[in-house]
Amino acid sequence: MIHKLDPNSKIIYIFVANIAPALIGARMATASFILISIVILTIGKVLHKTAPMLEFSGLILLTVAIIQGIFHQGNTTVAFALGSVVFYKEGLMFALGIALNVINILMSFSILVLTTKPSDMVETFVHMGLSPRLGYVMSSVFQIIPQMTKTMATITDAQRSRGMETEGKLKTRIKAFFPLISPVVMNSLISTKERAIALEVRGFGSKQKKTFLNDLQKTRYDDIFRFVLILILILSIFWRVLIWLK
Amino acid sequence: MAKIVAEHLKYKYPLSEKLALYDISFTIEPGEFIGIIGENNAGKSTLCQAMVGIVPNFYKGAYGGKVLIGDMEIAKSNISDICKKVGIVFQNPFNQVTGCKLTVYEEVAFGLENMGLPRSEMIDRIDYSLKLLDIYKYKDRNPFDLSGGQMQRMAIASIIAMRPEVIILDEPTSQLDPQGSEEVFRAVQNLSREGITIIMVEHKMEKIAEYSDRVMLLHEGKLIAFETPEKIFSRDDLDCYGVTAPAYTRICKSLGIKNKKTGFYPVTLEETKSLIGFSEKERCPYDQN
Amino acid sequence: MKRTSMWSFNLNTASLVLIPAAVGINYIGKLFAGALKLPLWLDSIGTILAACLAGPIVGAICGAINNIIYGFTLDPVSFIYAVTSIGIGVAAGILAYKGRIKTAVGAILSGLVIALVATVISTPINIGMYGGQTGNLWGDALFTWCTASHFPMWLASGLDELVVDIPDKVASVLIAFGIYKALPKNLTVLYKNDQKIERLD
């Protein structure tokens, strides 16, 4: 069901999930949106796929907590001490705020990223008015990245099987990789000429309004979903104004 | 259907000192099958690209004379308009894939989307061209998962779907294995039967001789001759231009067997057979000699 | 030949097709640095190269798309750093257009300028997102020391970023310069958006 939502609705969600807490200005609001995102991701059966992203940011967030917990400029209240290292409450709360923000961004974007085909996403952007030429660039990058990863994996494997470990002295490691990578890089650049020509002869430069083989359809759920989101946004603006008037 | 006319066409690539095409003039009639031959760097690819506007509109450089497709003047038109009349297929099947589509079906649609065709017409045209090239069964595959021959047929199908009046094939089989080449040649023959004008650059002279109505011989950017295959391959100076005649012609030349009607050496197996009297009735040609 | 403005948005197809290749090169650089466990990112070589070949607009688009794609595939936080990548692309494009990246020395100096640009743009984002840290081991060590010594936040965070950006951008510009030199001239001329057709009649 989540997969069938119009990518536009998911983009609106990202927008609301990150703007509303900022308007409301409470950590609870951020936390609630993280919870909502987790629920949506669970319905879409893709929650587990957020793990690598969380791992990536989690490591930085951990160092943020440690460094800010000890050294944050406003530190006064001692929270706890590990041996001679003292952690302060202010720094830890500061780090918690950062962590909530980062995780909220991560989770809200994950809904779009993990439940939408890249090609559909780009097509939505083009429908919305992104230049089809830039649309081409985006979809072809989505195609190129897996190809490059594959090529690099092949190269790394070849290196290992030849006994050229990725360990050892830096200079030898670099020397071993260069002759393998440069042809990949050079070929990818040299082939741009032929690819550009191939696109040109298929009307890529056409001024005509483009049509689409696949049409995208908005479902009933989209309307409900969007209605709720906009309601939340309006309510949080209302909240902001109330606080401001007090 | 449109005639192709070149008048005193001259062209020089940017940063180059030498002319790549030197004062070329010719006329190609609708529905003809034209072969282009000559050694490497003779100007074959440049000439092909001059008929779709890549020369000069993509490369820029210096240009003289003109090329007309019907009443459309190439140098003054956009490639995106020219490509509705003239399609081109290149050597390397891999680099012709747009790289932005996930299936063969969508890949063929690329040109049609750019032309702004309605969806139903797109589907009709894609189905037709995939079937004509015999790759309909691969329609849901990723373009990069096809074999070389299949990829090249997809490239041809992508062009066919745009319904051009002229199709140019620039060494379409030079990077394919024998099986892939055969697949492509069979597809080209099918196209020719549909009445489309075909212009093909090819190093396999047997294929040029078999399919072509007329053959262009290029050398150092100049058009040396534009004649029937029999006349071209019967020339005595072919080796000066780095061209080798088809095997049958070479054998008949050394044996001195000419076609009495035309006065030229034969260029295909069929013609050779009939000349030396090899027919179904008389199975053994040695009896004749 | 007179060159038109480097800010033309009228991009030719060759320079557009250059962008996916450049993003691919960024990615190779990133994987390469990872595989060799280098303390650098090396993830803007393609952006810098594209900017040198086709100007600041292509450099900027390249940087933006690079981070949008990373945002979609690896880490959504990189959407926000698209601003930095755009800055890198624009800076490299201008430096190349002004003829500053013609020698190895020029490439090193340009690397320093680009590092400075990247730092100026990234630091506020780092402060807003991660309380000033970058996630790079050496940079964050310096950040910790600065914070412990009661440096102001912006300075600690700026130094954190700069200490990684300087070697990273200098190395990236040098590599991009090397690739640029190795490319055939009849290819690089295609990416220029200001070529005209001469008449021979």
Image (tube, grey):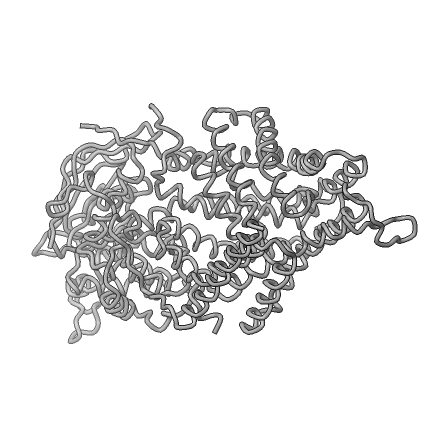
Residue B129 against residue C153 in the figure, above or below: below
- Please give the name of the residue rendered at 55% of the width and 74% of the height, measured from the top-left corner: A43
Residue B209 visible, this orientation:
yes
- Please give the name of the residue rendered at 25% of the width and 29% of the height, measured from the top-left corner: C198
Going by the image, does B67 lie left or right of C174?
Answer: left
How many numbered circles are shown? 0
Question: Residue C107: x percent and y percent?
Answer: 57, 28
Identify which residue, C186 or A135, lies in the foreground. Answer: A135
Identify which residue, C53 or B204, lies in the foreground. Answer: C53
Question: Residue C73: x percent and y percent?
Answer: 55, 57
Question: Residue C176: x percent and y percent?
Answer: 54, 36
Q: Residue furthest left?
A: B261
Going by the image, does B136 lie left or right of B73?
Answer: right
Question: Residue A242: x percent and y percent?
Answer: 55, 54
Q: Quadrant of residue B9?
A: top left
Identify which residue, C62 or A96, lies in the foreground. Answer: A96
Q: Residue furthest right?
A: A83
Residue A109 against residue B63 in the figure, above or below: below
Residue A77 against residue B7 in the figure, above or below: below
Identify which residue, C69 or C81, lies in the foreground. Answer: C81
Going by the image, does B56 lie left or right of C109?
Answer: left
